[in-house]
Amino acid sequence: MTDGINTLRYSDFFLAMYFDGGKSCLHRNHSHVLVYMYSGEMVIDEREKTTRLHKGDCAFIRKDFSVQMTKQAWNGEQFKAIFLMFTSKFLRGFYNRLDRDAIPKDAKRDEISLYKLPSNRPDIVSLFESMTPYFDSNIQPTEELLQLKMIEGIYVLLNTSKNLYASIFDFTDPWKIDILEFLESNYMNDISMQDSLVTYLKSVDGVREVKQSQQVANTLTDFNSLIGYISAGVILILLGVAVFLISNTVTVGIAVRREEIGIMKLIGATDYLVRAPFVVEGMVIGMIGAAIPLILLYFMYQKIIVYIAEKFNFIGAMINFVSVHTVFKTLVPVAIILGAGIGFLGSRMTIRKHLKV
């Protein structure tokens, strides 16, 4: 029990956990995991997808994938769950006993790392409800019983989808994992995960030695952080400059139209009617200021990528550049909204300071 978290672990297969508060952590397991929720809530974030598990829900998490897990009490009930962990040794033994004719020949390994099983299936309920006594630390399951429960858990998965054959037994041909594809999907975006990568590679059949440099990894991690801070500083400076320029433009407009503003007030124009054109002008200037670099970037982006690939071959081999259409699908609305927001802010600040109506 740690920090109010009650954890009961039996052998390498079985983990029971219950507590009243909440806990969030980055989860990376080198074994496949089958989790069942008795109560509470577990939020799993993986690859920009969020899955919520509640009472009666069951999910399969593939090994060697990073997922952010938040375990917490929910709806007045404590967090309470059981995790079955399928080690490679156990799976190899199970696979060797399988009837090869019963294995689907067209099973394909799914790319997803999290598979939520249908709720209220009798075999799932039967499996996990029989384990509720083991939340009591005084009751110890025997090794033989654990083995039976693990086998039952495997059949729960295999009866769910034929493609789970390929995901569970990914150490066998033709489902053997593509290492390059796996590395690009899970490790290439975060160099700080080098230790996990080395551990994984050492476990791969046929790998005798893995050479690594912790110093280089730390240097690159620090360099990435430095680039992030510098980029944030440059963005803030540019935002300040944009607000300043829009503010000056609106100030000039107010000065030029001072007599016109006076006439509008004399004929009964409201404060809103007098100020609105300047706010709209600021927002239009902001959006135009965002649109111009977007147009230039659209035509230059592909040329820049080609130039980098030709001049720096090692960069082209290491990095897969995103297509211009994918980039602009997100960049255009963000830039236009940001430009309009900066224009609104700059014009409002100027109106308050220079336009007294």
Image (cartoon, rainbow, N blue to C red):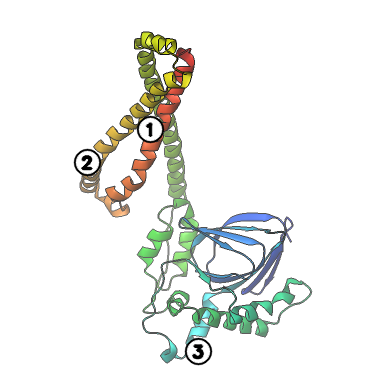
Residue 202, visible in the rendered structure? yes
Q: CA distance from mark 3 to mark 1?
A: 64 Å
Residue 46 x/y as whole percent: 49, 59
Local secondary structure at mark 2: helix
Q: Nearer the viewer, mark 1 or mark 2?
A: 1
Q: Residue at x 30, y 35 (%)?
A: 291
Which callout, 3 or 1, points to the residue nearer the camera? 1
Left or right: residue 98 compared with residue 337: right
Residue 57 screen position, x and y as percent: 59, 69
Which residue was labeled with disc 2? Answer: 299
Is residue 68 left or right of 143 when viewed as pictured? left
**What's under tag 3, amino acid-wise?**
Arg
On the image, which quarter does residue 53 sit in?
A: bottom right
The residue that label 3 is drawn on is 97
Check disc 1 and report the residue beneath it: 339
In this orientation, does residue 315 appear?
no
Q: Where on the picture, by quarter, is residue 148? A: bottom right
Asked if disc 1 and disc 2 are in contact, CB closer than 8 Å, the reply is no
Check disc 1 and give the amino acid type.
Answer: Gly
Question: Residue shown at 40%/55% (left/top)?
Answer: 188
Name which quarter of the figure residue 237 lies in: top left
Whether residues under marks 3 and 1 lie with C-beta atoms below 8 angstroms apart, the answer is: no
